[in-house]
Amino acid sequence: MKWGDPIFLKLLPVVIVLMVLVAIRATGALRRTRRLADDPLWSRVAPVIPAWRKWLLIGLPLLTLAACLLGAARPQLGSRKVQVKRSGIDLVLALDTSASMNAADVVPNRLARARREMIDLINELRGDRVGIVIFEGTAFLLCPLTLDYGAARLFLDTIEAGMLPVPGSNLAAAIRTTVKSFPSEGSRSRAVVILSDGEARDPDLADALKAASEAGVIIHTIGVGTPAGEPLPEWNEDGSVAGYKKDRSGEVVLSRLDESTLRDIASATGGNYFPATLAGGEVGAIVRSLEGMDQQEMKAGLRTHYEERFQFFAGLGILALFGFLITPSGGRRKEWRGRF
């Protein structure tokens, strides 16, 4: 037998303890009361309740509680295989992991905020396949399209700035890699969400956008950072900040959010641009846009369906409660033949 919610089984020992405590308390109360009168007088003035009825009045409520807990634990016996079908789209999340994503003009920094946005987005998906691409001077498919959202979140936990061997921020390479990550067959709708500060100068960006548009890929962009910019920290081996990046003239380099580039990328494929905010409203807006796309049905394989057998315990609990309600709590008294 399998249990759907076994946590309720942990409460059964509480029922047993209650049963023992109630029995001890009832026995002690009866013993103290019997001291008020001798046996001949007690049998005439006190109601005579059979022992079996006393135990019924104690045990039936506890049996009702135990049966309810067993039913809530969802006992399952027997199984069958069912074909599961899901409908949704294919979505690839492309994350900028270049050095500029270490800038702390958003809390705690751009990369951490972008990862949080991706997790929030994955948590809102229902039946959509999701993949993850990271990019700097080059791009890499970190997680192929999958319905396993837990695995996708695990991949996100491993992402750090500077993971790829080529520095920089090549948005064209990111777009080409995301387009290649979609299967060539099938008619599922395709979408990409790029999270970046937009600091890139790609001469072949227009060609990459044209290829994405021809493949029917809609690109949404999320800008992470601020237009005012922030110096780029440089780190010591122990992880502390050693200083800030400087150009050849010795001036501190400011990394700024380039909204115009990200907005142009989105508009070229029919997508939308959103700035990253603390409230996270952009995630909801993107989810609504994805839900408006054509949802294609796909087979997700076989799943084991277990037969629920809680009905037995539910019926037992109802019978026990009914038995308690109809069991008389009083007793009969012997006829009094004495004198006052």
Image (cartoon, grey):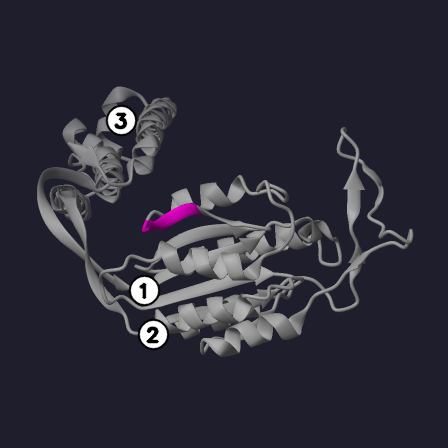
**Residue under label 1:** 89
Q: Magenta segment, which residues?
A: 142-147
- In this picture, residue 38 sits left or right of residue 168: left
* Element carrying mark 1: loop
Q: Are marks 1 and 2 in contact (CB under 8 Å)?
A: yes
Q: Residue at x 75, y 53 (%)?
A: 104
Circle 2 packing at 10 Å, graded few (<14), some (14-19), many (20+), is some
Question: Of helix, strand and loop, which mostly describes the magenta segment?
Answer: strand
- In this picture, residue 293 sits left or right of residue 334: right
Q: Is residue 223 among what the camera can see?
A: yes
In the rendered view, tell whether residue 45 sits above or below residue 209.
above
Q: CA distance from mark 2 to mark 3?
A: 86 Å
Residue sticking out furthest to the right: 250
Q: Amino acid at mark 1?
A: Ile
Q: Amino acid at mark 3?
A: Leu
| Viewport quadrant of the N terminus | top left
* Along the viewing direction, whichever of 332 and 306 lies nearer the viewer: 306
Residue 146 magenta: yes
Q: Position of residue 174 (x, y in %)?
A: 50, 57
Residue 293: numbered disc? 2
Q: Residue at x 29, y 64 (%)?
A: 88
Q: Earlier in the sequence, mark 1 or mark 2?
A: 1
Quadrant in the picture for residue 86: bottom left
Q: Residue at x 36, y 76 (%)?
A: 292
Q: CA distance from mark 1 to mark 3?
A: 84 Å
- In this picture, residue 280 sits left or right of residue 19: right
Q: Position of residue 17 (x, y in %)?
A: 35, 26
Q: CA distance from mark 1 to mark 2?
A: 8 Å
* Element carrying mark 3: helix
Circle 1 packing at 10 Å, graded few (<14), some (14-19), many (20+), is many
Q: Amino acid at mark 2?
A: Met
Q: Earlier in the sequence, mark 2 or mark 3?
A: 3
